Amino acid sequence: MAIQFLIPLAVGALVLAGCTKAVTEVRKSRPLTTLEGSEWGPLTPGPAEQFVAFKTGGEIVGNGGCNNFFGQYTQDGPKLTIGALASTKKMCATGMEDEAAFMKNLQDTRRAEATHKSLTLYGAEDNILMELKRRDWD
């Protein structure tokens, strides 16, 4: 008699599990309305680990591949402005050009498009500066 009740429950649980996965996949592709609380890195990581994190209160922190950096950002809808970035001043044997390009692209950003998994940064002439992937997404 217990088996009669277990089979429908098991089938129901499997159906609900499939629905949860579908909802999660849809959520990942929805546009983000704010970057606050997110962390991003290059689509194809290089030898040095670059990342940028958008913190609360308009604070931005990250690593250009050699040096840590910090500064301020403002976001109004898709408009994104990153202020002057201050950084540590280590000299690394390789990757300094990549770091300079990464930080310049951040500061040249004027607009952003993001989903829960990807972030595209655009410059003043609506050119793509960088495409990043979410690092803190489970």
Image (tube, helix red, strand yellow):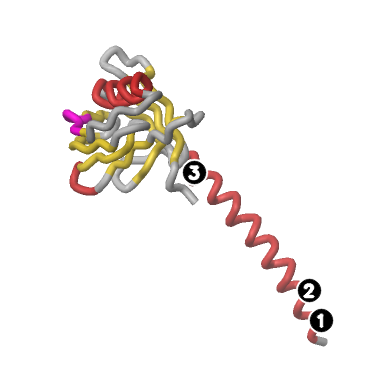
Element at label 1 = helix
**Which residue in the structure is indicated by mark 3?**
28
User: At x 23% / y 35%, what residue is drawn?
Assistant: 88
Q: State the residue lying farthest toward the bottom.
A: 1
Between marks 1 and 3 in the image, the one whose residue lies nearer the viewer: 3
Distance CA(mark 2)–CA(mark 1): 6 Å
Q: Which residue is pictured at 58% across the width and 56% down the height?
A: 20
For mark 2, does the 10 Å Cα neighbourhood hold few (<14), some (14 to 19), or many (20 or more) residues? few
> Which residue type does callout 2 highlight?
Ile
Q: Magenta region: which residues?
A: 82-86
Give residue 1's quadrant in the image. bottom right
Q: Report the residue that reaches farthest toward the top.
A: 125
Q: Is residue 120 above or below residue 55?
A: above
Residue under label 2: 7
Which percent across, then down, holds residue 119?
A: 40, 32
**Residue 102 counted in the magenta span:** no
Q: Could you tell me the amino acid type at mark 3?
A: Lys
Please give the name of the residue rendered at 43% of the width and 47% of the height, measured from the top-left corner: 136
| Crowd tier of the residue under label 3, counting other residues whose Cα lies within 10 Å: few below 14, some 14–19, many 20 or above | some
